[in-house]
Image (tube, rainbow, N blue to C red):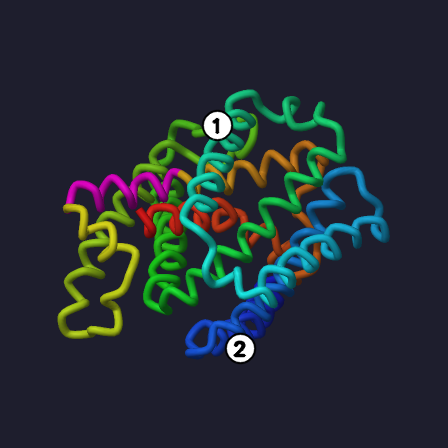
Amino acid sequence: MLKQRIITALLLLAVFLPALFHPDAHWLGLAGLFLVAAGSWEWGRLNNMGTVSALLMPAMCLMLCAAAWFSGAAALMPNALWLLGGVFWISLLFYFLKHGVDSWRILPAIIRNLIGIGVLTMTWLALYQAKSTGTSFLTSVLVLVWVADISAYFVGKQWGRHKLAPAISPGKSREGLLGGLLGVVVLSFAWLALQTPFPALSDSLFARLNAHGVFFMIAGVIFLTLISVAGDLFESLLKRSAGVKDSSRLLPGHGGVLDRLDALLPTLPIAMMLYLM
């Protein structure tokens, strides 16, 4: 299992790191389409679609993404779209995490899958526009999510006593959440400190938030961390509703694409919303 995880991780890095740091956003946009296609297929499979019929999900997502890409809209989505997308995601997370697995399960499958097409298309649009905004900005959002997850894991493993959402994800603890919050606050100040010797880091999420004041930055990164955790929990809710452990087996040793994207699905669009404020 460990060997599989390492090989899969290295292959993913070999594809996505060059695309992430390439100056042309089109390469990352192309790589992102593969993630969206795979993730949308998994979403359909988790929501009552068969192996073949679930191919309709990536077909719809790719059609919407391609329309935005070739029209030029993908790199210049209006601020109002990100505000609406942020409100949609916050409402979605709040409602279903509050009401639990059954609240998702009772929705008609067509509505669940339309939500999937919407959120995965929005994720690609956010990824593409974030890259168009600047590599430093996109990288800072990705690092925030990773630091939050890693900090929460280690703090929760060492000191976790109180469950965060036992009915959805028994492994997560309140102590781990606090560890994740502390980790991203430390990250934000460390990133700002590194901007002077490394000017390439300057156009980051943290710098943008800090332009409104240090307290706004702290509030912003805490909010995004909570959103990333909620995104993780929401994907766990989808899997519990479907009665599966992983979203698929597309990534040997890691599960599915949604298992790797879960925290980013809401975080990227909401980061764009905050960036454009």
Look at label 2 and name its amino acid: Ala
Taking 117 as reference, is 205 above or below it?
below
Q: Which mark is residue 119?
A: none
Report x, y in % for residue 242: 72, 36
What is the quadrant of the N terminus in the image?
bottom right
Q: Quadrant of residue 187?
A: bottom left
Q: Which mark is residue 94?
A: 1
Q: Magenta part mainly helix, strand or loop?
A: helix
Residue named by callout 2: 14
Helix, strand or loop at mark 1: helix
- Asked whether residue 253 appears in the rendered view, the answer is no
Choose the circle earlier in sequence order: 2 or 1: 2
Identified at 79% across, 49% down, the residue is: 54
The question of residue 131 being in magenta is answered with no
Identified at 66% across, 62% down, the residue is: 252
Query: In the shown orientation, is residue 121 left or right of residue 181?
Result: right
Look at label 1 and name its amino acid: Phe
Read off the magenta span.
214-226
Report x, y in % for residue 123: 53, 52
Seen from the viewer's position, the closer of residues 122 and 1 is: 122
Distance from the alpha carbon under mark 2 to that under mark 1: 36 Å
The question of residue 216 being in magenta is answered with yes
Report x, y in % for residue 41: 73, 52
Report x, y in % for residue 211: 18, 52
